Image (cartoon, rainbow, N blue to C red):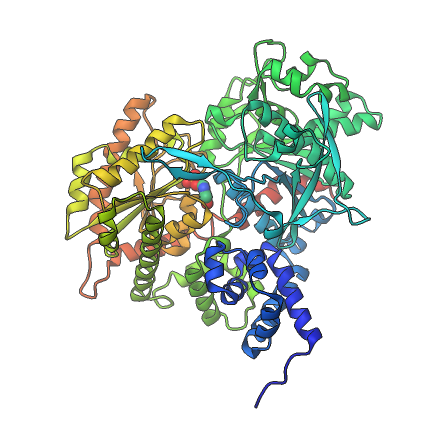
Amino acid sequence: MATPPLTASEVQELVGGLGRLARNLWWSWDQDAQDLFHDLSPRGWQNLYHNPVAVLHEVSAYELRVRMQEPGFAARVRTVLGKFEAYLRHDRTWAAMEAPRMASAPVAYFSAEFAFHETLPIAAGGLGALAGDHAKSASDLGIPFVGVSLFYREGYFQQAINHENWQTEYYTQLNPRNLPVEPVLDSRGEPLVCTVRVAATTVRFHAWRVNVGRVPVYLLDTNRPENEPHLRDLTLRVYGGDSTTRVLQEIVLGVGGVRLLRMLGHQPGTFHMNEGHAAFLTLELIREKLASGLSFDEAARRTTAECLFTTHTPVEAGHDRFSPDLMAYAAHGLASDLGLNHDQLMGLGRVKAEDPHEPFCMTVLALRFSRAANGVSALHGEVSREMWKELYHAPHEEQVPIGHVTNGIHLVGWMKGTVRKFWRGKHRELHPGRTDLDWIADANSREFWASVSDPAVVSDAELWALRYRLRRELIEFTRRRLLLQGHTFSPGDFITFDSFLNPDALTIGFARRFATYKRAPLIFDPFDDVVRLVRDSSRPVQFIFAGKAHPRDDAGKAFIQKVIHLSKYSELKGHLVFIENYDIHVCRMMVSGCDIWLNNPRRPLEASGTSGMKTTPHGCLNLSILDGWWREGYDGSNGFAIGPDSHPADVAEQDRVDSLNLYHALTEQVIPEFFHLDSDGIPRRWVARIRRAMATLAPEYTTWRMVQEYTRKYYLPAAGNS
Ligand SMILES: *Cc1c(COP(=O)(O)O)cnc(C)c1O
C-alpha cells in the first residue's frame, strides 16, 4: 500500500530539523545523522569535505522536498531528529546525577584553538583537538559549560609541498555561511558587538556560536568594518603572524572573552584556561572587581579563587613570552584600566617581579591567578612542578601546587564510521533495550570494553577481518590522496599507482605536528636495516607519514623534506608515503587503518599526546616511548614500549639509544608477532594484544573520564556547598 504523501508542513518540519541538525556538531558523533547528509549527496559529502551545512546548500529546496517523500528517508530523518531532541533534553546526565552542584557554577573554558571536525579547520594541533573533545564530553556529561575562542577566518594553514619537497603554506577563506556556526545577535537581531582596548586603540568584535551538542562555544571575530584594517585581521589566522599579532589576539581572547560572556549573562563558577594564551582573562576579572570597589589585593584574591589553569607543554617555545617593549605597546590600556604602571603589570607575568630583563610570560600570569593548576599526565605534572618551583619559592618539586589530569579523547567522536557502526552493532546485540543515549555512556564504560574484548562476543576472525577492512580503507584513501598530490610522482608512476602500498603489509603510521622534539625521521636512522625490513616479501612492512611543521620552523620543515625525499628517491619508495595536509580527517583515517601507531618523542617533552588514544577502538596498537599518557597506559601486553621508563640526560645519547630501542622493539616483538599466523591465517597473539588494549585503554583515556576528573578535583570545589 502506498504511504500517503507528507503534507507541506510535515516536509517543512523535517527540512527545518535537518537545518538545525547541520548546525549542531552533535551530528559528528552520531553515525545515523552523518549518514543522512551523506545520502543526500554522496559526492557532495566527499567533495565538500563532510560538511552538512554545505551539503544542504548544494541540494536545492525542491530536491529536499521531493526526497522527503521517500518514506524510508523521511522515517530516518524523523528518527535522527528524535534522537537529537532526546540528547538535547536529556536531564539525567552524569552531572545532574553525580555533580548537581555544578548547576550553580558553570565552567567557562577558554582555548586559543578548538578542533571539532574537519569542517571547521580553526586549530593547529593536539591542543585544539583536546579542547574540542573536552567540549563534546562536557556536553555528553551534562556539565554546564561554555567555550570561548577566536574565529580565524583563514583558519590554520593548508600545507603544500613544492618541487624541492619543502613545505609551503597557503590559506583559504572560510565562509561562515557554509560552516556550522551562527552569528551571536543582540535583542534587535543585529550582531552583538563588544570592545576591547588593544595597543593605543579600541577594537570591536562580534562572535559566532558553535553548537557542540548541548554546549555553546563562542568564537570572537574582529573582522568588522569599523576597525582599522590591521585590527580587522587580528583574528585572521591561528596564532597568526608575529608576536605583536599574537599578544593582541590573546588580549582579545582573554579580556574580550570575559566581556562577551558577561553581555550574554554568563556567571561562570570556574574560568578554565586551556594553556596560557587565555591568561589575560584574569586581568579582566580583576578589573571587574576593582570597578565594583574592591582593593587590588582583594580583587586578585577573588579572581584567583575563580580560575583554573592547565599547562600543556614543557617545551620552552610553547610558553608565550612578550618583551617589556611589546607589552608597553600592546597592553598599556590593560594596565591603566587596572590602575597599574608598566612595571607593576610586567611583574604579574614574571617569576621575579623586579627583574627588568624578564619578559612577560603568559604561563606565569595564569599560574599566579589560579586557585589550582595541572599538567596533562603524571610525568608532565612532575616536570611542570620542577619547571615552576621558583615561582612558588619552593626548593623542592613536591611543594609546588601543580597537579595533573591525564588527557583523553572523545571516544565516540573519534571512531571512524565503519567502526562506530561495528561497535554500535555489538552494543545492540549485547544490550537490546539500550538507547542511543545509553550507547554514548556505555561506549565510555569499562564494562562495555571488557565485554567486547571477550572472544565470545567478537571472535578473533571477526576482529581480524575488521582490521583488514580498515587497513584497506586507509590504503585506498592514501592512494587517492597521492593521486591528488600529483607532483609526488613522475608521470610514469601513475601507471603503477595501485602498487603503492600493500594491503597485506604491517602498516606503521606516524602523524602529528612536525615539531623537532617528536623526531619524525628517527625510525629511518639505521637506514639499511629499515630497507631490509620493507623489502622482506614474506614479512612486508610499510610506513605512512603525515604532519605539518609550524610555518616558521625550518628544522621541522627539514624533517618533512627528509621523509618525502626518502619516499620518492630511496629504496623505501612505494613502502613509505607522505600524506599532505594533515588534519582531523587524515588523522581519523590513519589511526583506524594503521596497525602500529608510532610515537618517538624526546622524553619528557610529550606532555601527554592524544593521537595514540584514538587508535584503540580501531584495533591499531601503540609503539611508543614511555612518555606522556603511554607511560601510564602501557601495561606490557596492550601495545609496545620503546625503551624503559627512564631516559639519558644527554640529548644526543637519548636519540642514539631510542633509535636502537625502536629498531629492537620492531624486529624482536612487533614484526614477529604480526606475522605469526595460525592455520586460519590469524595472528592470535597480536589479536590478543588488541583485545587487551581495548579492555585497558579504551575506557580510560577518554575525555569522558577526564572531564569527570576535572569536575571532581577542580570544578566542584568552586561550586560551594549549596
Ligand atoms: C589528535 C590530533 C593531534 C595530536 O596528536 P599528538 O600525536 O598527540 O601530538 C594533532 N593533530 C590532529 C589533527 C589531531 O587530530
Q: Is residue 489 above or below residue 471?
A: above
At x 84%, y 28%, the residue is: 292
For the point 80% across and 25% down, which residue is it? 290
Residue 183 higher or lower than 631, as above or below: below
Residue nearest the viewer, comparing 13 with 153: 153
Q: Nearer the viewer, residue 619 or 586?
A: 586
Q: Is residue 87 visible?
A: no
Q: Position of residue 362 (x, y in %)?
A: 59, 25
Place of residue 721 in the rendered image (x, y in percent of width and height, measured from the top left): 74, 43
- Considering depth in this image, is 495 or 502 the residue closer to the camera? 495
Quadrant housing the C terminus: top right
359 relative position to 514: left or right: right
View extreme (front): residue = 491
Residue extending furthest toward the right: 293
Q: Is residue 618 left or right of residue 445?
A: left
Residue for point 52% across, 62% down: 34
Q: Quadrant of ligand 1?
A: top left
Above or below, 67 against 226 in this view is: below
Quadrant of the snapshot with the N terminus: bottom right
Q: Quadrant of residue 161?
A: top left
Q: Position of residue 701 (x, y in %)?
A: 47, 47
Q: Position of residue 225 (x, y in %)?
A: 71, 36
